[in-house]
Amino acid sequence: MHGPGTDRKDGHHLVPLGEARDHVLARCRSLAPIECDLVDAAGAVLAAPVRAAHDVPPFANSAMDGYALRAADSAGAPVTLVVVGAVMAGEVPAVPVGAGQAVRIMTGAPVPDGADAVCKVERTRPGEPGTVVIERSVDAGENVRAPGEDIAAGDEVFAPGTVLTPAHVGVLASLGVEAVTVHPRPRVAVLATGDELVSGPAPLAPGKIRDANRPALLAQLAEDGFVPVDLGRVGDDPDAVADALERGGATADAVVVTGGVSVGDRDVAKEVVGRLCDDMRWMQVAIKPAKPFAFGIMTASGVPVFGLPGNPVSALVSYELFARPALRQRAGHGNVDRPRLAAVADADLRRRADGKLHLMRVVASAGPDGTVRVRPVAGQASHQLRSLADADGLALVPDGDGVRAGEAVEVLVVDADRLAGPDRPWGW
Ligand code: AMP
Ligand code: MG
């Protein structure tokens, strides 16, 4: 008897995706905070609050090139004022502004004492020598940037958990901050296993294939903001796999191994992960691709190991669903998942009922009305890596006979930039 949650082909109990993810995420805590130079901090997650040591802007300054004046003097505009000086950005005003007077001022220059507004140069014209004609009245405070208007001294500028963007780096630089307390980017070691694997351009010997997973995962880790560590390639030899995994545990914050986690005679990686971890859990997850998955915390090092399937699409999808969120959690992120969008199928997303969630490779485009539309990419088997390279996302096609054209489907967006698409013109 095969109920839901049981693989129809091999009778293994299938673990729901959510349960498998929860198992992993519950065991991958954030890394202890470190001090990080501000220049290296973009992408990192703040682990301690930052307070402002001073106001930003630090002093009242002009928002325009123009004339600093007393707003009251401009009431009967046009009016002529006597120009008593000039102040450039970076200077200190030499003279105050009295009644009937103005000081030529540039954007960012301190507003002289006595002045309470700036009239932009486009609203003025030269008068008699030594004077300026103010053509329109200005209100008190107009075109003056008040001290502390952006950030007040003592403010908590950014709270722990903030993901630092270039704008955050700019703000922190404006406050004189040179180092911040952040969660470190996890160092992640990658090992490929398989007797059939070779690398490089030499002609392939019979039965051999080139290792695609390790370069792909190293690249993915770098793209995701982690620090990739290459453990190389080993055959299906338990001692060699164990040595490499232990090396990974000693030098990295997480280890990813591909191949050898299924039910084949030479699937040794899962046995070795079991040997090195007290709590290894091997799962048949109710998804396609990427059904087999092994996970544990290495006893010697406390480092998590992700045992991903060898089929290249399965390896990357398994990374995407388990390793990436767990590693983001290690990096301190609260938001660990890719965006999931409500989309409409542009073509049928066909499948058979098998008790699993299918993650179908799709190309996505946002139509002129902003609706995301998806079409399946040709070649959905788990060894067909090229179609993953062509895909923008993974459509989450629930168990059943698929999604018909025109029906709604949820999509995990793996390449949001491509969603912008040439068919989404700027109509502004
Ligand atoms: P396994 O999970 O070891 O049973 O491997 C499943 C399939 O993935 C087999 O066809 C392997 O040859 C293939 N495979 C395993 N590792 C890699 C790799 N690093 N690069 C490309 N294909 C691989
Ligand atoms: Mg193998």
Image (tube, rainbow, N blue to C red):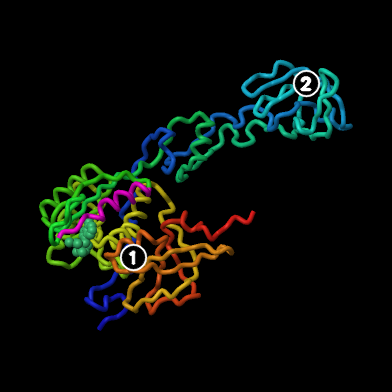
Compare residues 56 and 42 and report the one nearer the observer: 42
Residue name at image x 70 percent, y 29 percent: 65
Return the x and y of residue 216 as percentages of the image width and height.
29, 53
Compare residues 26 and 199 and report the one nearer the observer: 199
Asked if disc 2 and disc 1 are in contact, CB closer than 8 Å, the reply is: no
Real-space CA distance between mark 2 and mark 1, rounded to the nearest whole angstrom: 70 Å
Per the picture, the main secondary structure of the magenta-coloured stretch is helix
Position above or below: 104 against 50 = above
- The residue at which mark 1 appears reads as 19
Q: Is residue 38 visible?
A: yes
- The residue at which mark 2 appears reads as 97
Return the x and y of residue 86 as percentages of the image width and height.
72, 20
Q: Is residue 211 magenta?
A: yes
Quarter of the rendered image showing ligand 2: bottom left
Density class for disc 2 (Cα within 10 Å; few <14, some 14-19, many ≥20) is: many
Q: Does the numbered disc 2 mark a residue whose Cβ is under 8 Å from ligand 1? A: no
Q: Secondary structure at mark 2?
A: loop
Query: Which residue range is magenta in the image?
Result: 208-224
Q: Secondary structure at mark 1?
A: helix
* Relative to 395, 74 lies left or right: right
Position above or below: 404 against 266 = below
